[in-house]
Image: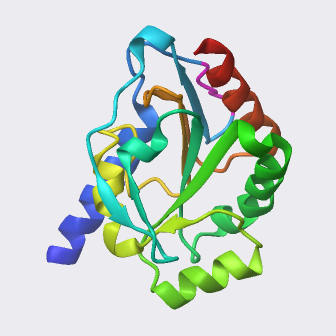
């Protein structure tokens, strides 16, 4: 009975995340299952304070996301679309260089499985440990959910969410979102 309720709740959260049309959001794509939303500079959701541990032993806090545009990608090694988008994320990192910083938010993986995924795809940025993923995701105040994997957010230099992608993202879309967040600041 408990598994059925948890499954129903997660399904409801996922469907709700895909159907949310936030005030101030634009650019929603209706012809693909992936959802891309951009937020106007004056209407960007802010983040709650957070401190989390990373797979590499470092820490990440909300204050680390200020000063430059930041991309955060929610992923899991068990997620097929996450595996498909990993090379796209690496391409975006290489193309954007110092114009953006990148972090991953790993969900539901053991540390060994997460590190193996990072090695297999040559992921050049650190990721939040699965044990701390809930804390990181909650800081986004509903913009991210653990039920929508993969998901990606672009945070502007002031710490406001400039864009989110629910579903698999490609390099050109992500680069465009980062450039839009940079020019809107």
Magenta highlight on residue 29? yes
Location of residue 165 in the rendering, given as x and y in whole percent from the top left corner: 58, 39
Rendered view: 1 above or below 104: below
Rendered view: 76 above or below 101: below
Rendered view: 77 above or below 28: below
**Left or right of residue 13, residue 60 in this image:** right
Question: How would you classify the magenta stretch by its main secondary structure?
Answer: loop
- Specify whether residue 1 is in view: no
- Residue at image position (67%, 40%) is 100
Check the image and name the residue furthest to the top.
42
**Left or right of residue 23, residue 122 in this image:** right
What's the image's color scheme?
Answer: rainbow
Check the image and name the residue furthest to the left.
1
Nearer the observer, 3 or 131: 131
- Residue at image position (82%, 37%) is 172
| Quadrant into which the C terminus falls | top right
**Left or right of residue 184, residue 18 in this image:** left
Magenta highlight on residue 148? no
Rendered view: 12 above or below 175: below
**Left or right of residue 110, residue 167 in this image:** right
Task: Specify start and end residues of the magenta stretch as a single range.
Answer: 27-31
Location of residue 90 in the rendering, given as x and y in whole percent from the top left corner: 78, 58
Hey, which quadrant is residue 8 in on the image? bottom left
Hey, which quadrant is residue 1 in on the image? bottom left
Location of residue 168 in the rendering, given as x and y in whole percent from the top left corner: 66, 50
Nearer the observer, 60 or 164: 60
- Specify whether residue 118 is in view: yes
Check the image and name the residue furthest to the bottom.
112
- Residue at image position (35%, 55%) is 136
- Residue at image position (15%, 75%) is 2
Location of residue 50 in the rendering, given as x and y in whole percent from the top left corner: 28, 51
């Amino acid at each position: 009975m408990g598994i059925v309720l948890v499954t129903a709740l997660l399904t409801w959260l996922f469907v709700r995340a895909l159907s949310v049309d936030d005030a101030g959001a634009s650019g929603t794509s209706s012809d693909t299952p992936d959802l891309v939303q951009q937020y106007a500079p004056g209407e960007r959701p802010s983040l709650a304070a957070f401190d989390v541990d990373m797979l590499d032993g470092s820490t990440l806090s909300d204050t680390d996301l200020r000063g430059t545009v930041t991309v955060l990608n929610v992923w899991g090694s068990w997620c097929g679309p996450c595996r498909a988008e990993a090379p796209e994320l690496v391409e975006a990192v290489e193309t954007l260089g110092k114009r953006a910083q990148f972090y991953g938010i790993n969900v539901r993986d053991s540390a060994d499985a997460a590190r193996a995924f990072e090695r297999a795809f040559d992921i050049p940025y650190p990721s939040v440990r699965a044990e701390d993923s809930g804390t990181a995701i909650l800081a986004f105040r509903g913009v991210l959910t653990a039920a929508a994997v993969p998901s990606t957010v672009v945070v502007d230099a002031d710490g406001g969410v400039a864009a989110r992608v629910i579903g698999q993202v490609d390099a050109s879309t992500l680069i465009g979102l980062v450039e839009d967040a940079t020019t809107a600041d």
